[in-house]
Image (spheres, rainbow, N blue to C red):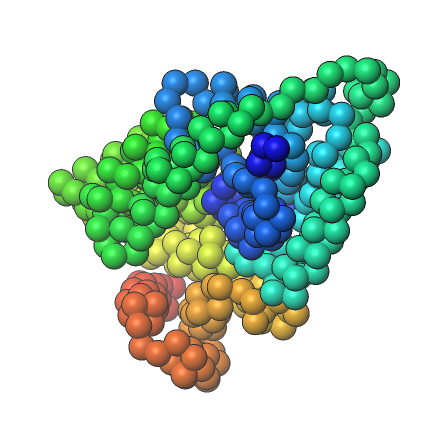
Amino acid sequence: MNEKTCFVIIGYGIKTDYTTGREIDLDKTFKNMIEPVFRELGFLCFRASDIQHSGMIDIPMYENILKADFVVADLTTLNPNVLYELGIRHAVRKNTTIVISDKELKYPFDLSHIIIDSYEHLGKAIDYDEVLRFKQLLEEKVQSLLENPQTDSPLYTFFPTMRMPSFSEEEIQDIKESIETETSVSDLLLEAESAKENLEYSKAISILEKALELAPHNDFIVQRLALSTYKSKLPSAIDALSRAELILLELNPDQTTDLETLGLSGAINKRFYEELGEISFLKKSLKYYERGFHIGNDYYNGINAAYLYTLLSVESEDIFDAYANFGQGNLIRKRVIEICNDIIASKIWDEREDKQWVLLSLAEAYFGVGDEEKVSEIVSDVGKLFGDDFSMDSFRTQQQKLTDAIALFNAKYLSSGQ
């Protein structure tokens, strides 16, 4: 009897849910909840990104959709590729297709008749109790379908005599060897992330370029490549920024609503401004950060937009523009304070992986509006929880930049009595 297979239709890396603005790490869904269940049941469980391939990616992908004993399709973020591939699966397989999604999915009308099992994703992590709950639900469902397969395809409901394809023993062995012996896109992304964390940006760039050859036009890989490129500062800071900006053009930053692309575009142009001092880069950076803030209502884009408004107030020649920009920066900081405090008070606070950045963004926002007591309290808490590390150094550097900008504004407009 051939080894059973499960092909998982899911995005990889961090994806944006455009209906809510949330960023969701789908690797956590696959690695923590789906793959362990099928592995424990004796299945070979894999994604498209786990398989090394050459030539057109469509060929192995369609084969996996057609022949896998089970398919799990995760509709979180309503990725159009996932929806399309689910439709193909329903067209060629009578049963054993399981559809899942984060509980905040906004159901498209045409999916309202399909059973979708929901789980709660926290964005960058999943609560351990939720992992245990959903794994049990998924295991029970798979066991039930193994014992008594039920038609889940709308097409086979109307055409029940259609024949279904399946993998041969040789084909399954080929898949196993590809997963076990070759470097997949997933492997390359893990290598690239490790290199980036070790500040080996040239190495990360080389790995990501190889990953992009295997998965052309993949937004997540393009974003990581742009990030590593501008951080490399090679052969010079300006050259690296220019190359990173060109890389991001593929993702259409002037039109996109993707928070990661907007954040990267904002960061690149902010660094252009710091290097060249040209106000056009400051305004361009502010455009990206502010759009990301309004779309995602998130602290990262917000705290950066607030800082840039303060810088713009110093650059303004018209006194009314200067006061308006300075005031807008503080209005955004007050909103960032609300956002961060809401995050801290939420039930998922302990599970968040960005707690340090939330707290430091909150401290910067309080500093910008002049609440020194709150700043000292938060910085003390961060020091106790995380120590005096790179993040704290970044906060102090940013605090000094903000101090200088506020001092320049006061000297230019307040001390002169304007």
Residue found farthest to the front: 1
Residue found farthest to the right: 158
Question: Position of 328 compared to 93: left or right?
Answer: left
Q: Nearer the viewer, residue 290 or 9?
A: 9
Q: Quadrant of residue 82?
A: top right
In this view, 137 is above or below 340: above
Residue in the picture at 72% in, 44% down: 142
Q: Position of residue 346 (x, y in %)?
A: 64, 69
Q: Is residue 251 visible?
A: no
Residue in the picture at 77% in, 15% down: 162
Q: How many marks?
A: 0
Q: Is residue 124 visible?
A: yes
Q: Nearer the viewer, residue 234 or 296?
A: 234
Q: Position of residue 414 (x, y in %)?
A: 37, 68
Q: Position of residue 151 (x, y in %)?
A: 81, 30
Residue in the picture at 63% in, 59% down: 131
Question: Position of 143 compared to 209: left or right?
Answer: right
In this view, 99 is above or below 309: above
What is the quadrant of the N terminus in the image?
top right
In this view, 387 is above or below 236: below
Q: Position of residue 38 (x, y in %)?
A: 61, 46
Q: Quadrant of residue 92?
A: top right
Q: Nearer the viewer, residue 172 or 45?
A: 172
What is the quadrant of the C terminus in the image?
bottom left
Question: Position of 38 compared to 118: left or right?
Answer: left
Q: Quadrant of residue 386?
A: bottom left
Residue found farthest to the left: 235
Residue in the picture at 25% in, 57% down: 198
Question: Position of 406 compared to 201: left or right?
Answer: right
In this view, 147 is above or below 379: above
